[in-house]
């Protein structure tokens, strides 16, 4: 390895901490905290590309891993930028947090932005492990992970597109989206996001530091199921859609896609 892995990750974190300070200042003006999510995506791309220039490894593998990071985070970042930032009002989840934080809103939001810097460094580790793989050529297990990646990233993109199309129609403003993938899961985008991180676990089986790839599915699963994903989203959905969303909860799985238990 061209550089010490710990030094690489620490440098990535410090750089992202500075970037997040700038984005926090920007959100003070635009009042849209979703730029932290865009910053996370852009930061992950930048960090993984930087790793690829610093680590001694197989060129083809580094190119593949870099491409996976760019395609995954680039697609997600552009979706958030276009659907939640440019010309959009702040996501209701963030508005609700600001109200709850009250006088401490600025300080707490600063802390939230800094946690996104920690998240970039943490979730960059699976990519660093793959890049650092000393094998001279691709192993079969690495290629097995690719179909999982393709299904997961495609599924997340499809779920996001279906939700965006649903919300683009004014008459759906207060309605529950149960079109397409949303018929089988209340949060199919979150499910496929989580599934995507398993691809790196499988691809990294033969790599030193393989256990670090588990940060992806474990960390993202915890965040989506217990912290900033489903809990935030469902509280807001219940507040804005009331009984319709309670019926959706009764009939449809929260996370893993499955056939609905009844008709909405």
Image: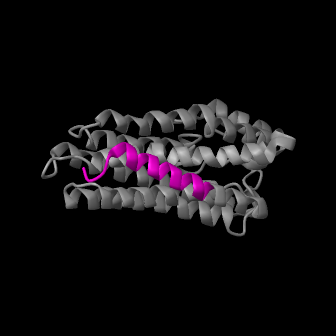
Q: Give the image location of residue 52, x and y in percent.
A: 31, 58
Picture layout, residue 170 above or below residue 178: below
| Residue drawn 73% across the image and 56% down it | 172
- Report the side of 107 relative to 198 (left or right): right
**Quadrant location of the C terminus in the rendered image:** top right
Q: Nearer the viewer, residue 215 or 12?
A: 12
| Residue drawn 68% across the image and 68% down it | 86
User: Is residue 192 at least partly visible in the picture?
Assistant: no
Q: Nearer the viewer, residue 114 or 3?
A: 3
Q: Which of 99 and 261 is in front in this view?
A: 99
Q: Give the image location of residue 127, x and y in percent.
A: 35, 49
Would you say the magenta stretch is mainly helix, strand or loop?
helix
Q: Quadrant of residue 25?
A: bottom right
Residue stretch in magenta: 1-20
Q: Nearer the viewer, residue 201 or 164?
A: 201
Give yes or no for residue 16 being in the magenta stretch: yes
| Residue drawn 57% across the image and 51% down it | 17
- Report the side of 122 relative to 96 (left or right): left
Picture layout, residue 147 above or below residue 63: above
- Report the side of 227 relative to 214 (left or right): right
| Residue drawn 69% across the image and 56% down it | 24
């Amino acid at each position: 390895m061209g550089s010490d892995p710990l030094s690489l990750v620490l440098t990535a974190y410090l750089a992202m901490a500075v970037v997040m300070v700038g984005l926090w200042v920007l959100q003070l003006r635009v009042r849209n905290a979703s730029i932290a999510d865009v910053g996370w995506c852009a930061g992950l791309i930048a960090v993984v590309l930087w790793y690829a220039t610093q680590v001694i490894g197989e060129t083809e593998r580094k190119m593949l891993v870099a491409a996976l990071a760019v395609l995954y985070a680039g697609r997600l970042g552009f979706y958030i930028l276009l659907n939640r930032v440019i010309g959009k009002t702040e996501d209701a989840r963030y508005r609700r947090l600001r109200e709850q934080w009250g006088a401490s809103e600025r300080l707490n939001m600063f802390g939230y932005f800094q946690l996104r810097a920690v998240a970039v460094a943490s979730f960059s580790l699976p990519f660093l492990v793959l890049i650092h793989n000393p094998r001279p050529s691709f192993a079969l297990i690495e290629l097995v992970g690719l179909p999982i990646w393709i299904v997961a990233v495609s599924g997340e993109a499809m779920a996001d597109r279906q939700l965006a199309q649903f919300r683009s129609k004014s008459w759906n403003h207060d309605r529950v989206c149960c079109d397409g993938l949303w018929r089988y899961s209340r949060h199919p985008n979150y499910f496929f996001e989580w599934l995507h991180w398993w691809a790196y676990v499988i691809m990294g089986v033969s790599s030193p530091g393989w256990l670090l790839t588990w940060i992806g599915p474990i960390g993202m699963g915890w965040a989506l199921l217990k912290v900033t994903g489903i809990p935030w989203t469902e509280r807001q959905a219940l507040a804005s859609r009331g009984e319709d969303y309670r019926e959706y909860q009764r009939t449809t799985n929260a996370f893993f896609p499955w056939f609905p238990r009844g008709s909405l």
